[in-house]
Image (cartoon, rainbow, N blue to C red):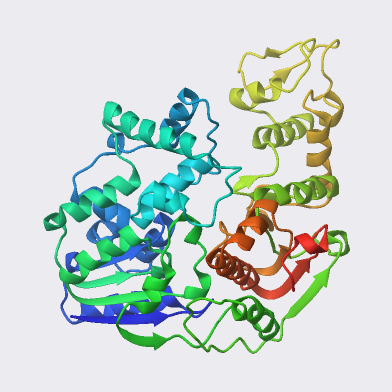
Amino acid sequence: MSVIKFFGPPGTGKTYKLISRAKAHLRTGVPLNKIGYFAFTKKAAAEAKNRMPYDNKKLPYFQTLHSLAFHSLGLSEEMIMQPFHYEDLGKRLNIKVKFFTKQNEDDSFYLTCDNIYFQLINRAKNKDISIEEEYATNEYSREDIVWDILKTVNENLEVYKKKTNLIDFNDMVKNFISQKDKCPEFDVVIIDEAQDLSPIQWQMFDILKKKSKKMYLAGDDDQAIYAWAGADVDRFIKEPGVHKYLTQSKRIPRKVQEISKLPISRIIGLRQEKIYHPKKEEGLVQKIFDINKLNLHEGRWLILARTDYRLQDIKEFLFQKGIYFQIKKEKSFSVKLYNAVIDYTNWSRGVSLSVTKVKDIFDFLPYNIDKKFIENKTELIIDETGLKRNIKWFDIFTAKQQDKIYIRDMLSNGENLNEEARIRLSTIHAAKGGEEDNVIVILDNAKKIREAVQRSVKKRDEEHRVWYVAFTRAKKNLYLLRAKKERNGYQI
């Protein structure tokens, strides 16, 4: 049994290398159902499938580790705790539970709620330790977490799952480990983003190791930013295997690489030294004090912040400038209102509309407008006391004034609102794996994060990795936006 470890710095083509390995084994006669390709997110697993020259149905084991456990155990979605279950339990316990994002293709299966009690409980499970042991680490403020409340929440969570006959994602993995005979046997197992695996996922790895003839691990310890949820980057570094390094980045220009060396040079704990070459382009790195100095009306941009809160100011700025953007894949404006604006404008120019489009326009017209259909029911008919075709949508629509102004300004600026936005806003964690020509990194850091960094060296190392990931999203130009208070920002 051999293990080959690929260390892949940003943009060096880890996925390409792993897919090449899978194809090479297929050429030697390894059956498709004897290759296991396990990615960290559903999106990454889907991307790997799409890069293979086969129908997805013929690739049964290109999936996440959680999906492997799910299917091997014969589970159904109705058996798994969902965000609304946690929210329901939170209401019963009189604690607020809010999820940052709904589960989707980017879901890493780490609980992404903002309730620190559930976060601690699930982190302990991911690390395969008790809540007492996790609570005893130096990463939590005693002001934020009260032991008696934590104990009560944990006990009630277990009772809730038992009464509803549900398991959570960590239970799923633990059940797979305890029923390891249900794990399929493979000729080849490939695990991507291995630096993000938690201790219980590493136990899955140990089972797969015994069930396969050859294994490939790929990752980058410098991009290990899920320690907050229990990821065990040290295990990835220490895992025995033949080390191979991907040394040419197709993303990072020279100046961006130079500035990105600063955060990882501050890591105190275990780290694998790696050397990789940047692109030939010089690129640009510039520290800025005012985002207004940048021309955001042109080009493609990714704006990154450490927390959602810091993105609020940027959203307001873009609203005021009439610039179209997306955040968490959602457009910055009401699509329904925009469609009504376009349809109304077309109607005012004499274009006939479908009944559906007419009704959608009616949602934004005053109640005193005479709203009728002519006999063919494809066009608005307005009498002399009603709506005239020469009245502009902006003057008659009853939507919020700020929403109307925003759409009007975006259209005036020539923004194409039917396509994906040129500008994306994201937290650094959510942007992992992404890239863009122009990247703005907001250097502000939240108070709780600063305090956690002071209490824990491991947390400090993780924080350096977070900013390394942020800087290395830039394909051409990197702009570092100074924190509102310099002492509260990441120091460059």
Q: Which of the 4 image quadrants contains residue 23? A: bottom left
Residue 449 vs 232, above or below: the answer is above
289 or 408, which is in the foreground? Answer: 289
Give the residue displayed 65% in from the left and 47% down from the top. Answer: 418
Q: Which sits in the foreground, 94 or 224?
A: 94
Q: Using the rendered view, name the quadrant where residue 246 is placed.
A: bottom left
- Indicate the position of residue 363 as horizontal and vertical percent values: 69, 21
Q: Position of residue 152 (x, y in %)?
A: 42, 32
Q: Is residue 97 visible?
A: yes
Nearest the eye: 191 or 126: 126
Q: Can you give x and y, in whole percent of width and height, for residue 176 in the image?
A: 21, 52
At horizontal 70% and vertical 32% (from top left) the residue drawn is 337
User: Residue drawn 82% across and 63% down?
Assistant: 486
Q: Nearer the viewer, residue 408 or 459?
A: 459
Residue 102 seen in the figure: no
- Residue 154 lies in what quarter of the image? top left
Q: Vertical placement of 312 versus 12: above or below?
A: above
Decide if residue 246 is on the left or right side of residue 323: left
Give left or right: position of 351 versus 243: right
Give the mark count: 0
Considering only vertical position in the picture, is 275 above or below 178? Answer: below
> Is residue 11 toward the left or the right of residue 351 in the image?
left
The answer to whether residue 32 is above or below residue 86 is below
The quarter of the rendered structure image containing the C terminus is bottom right
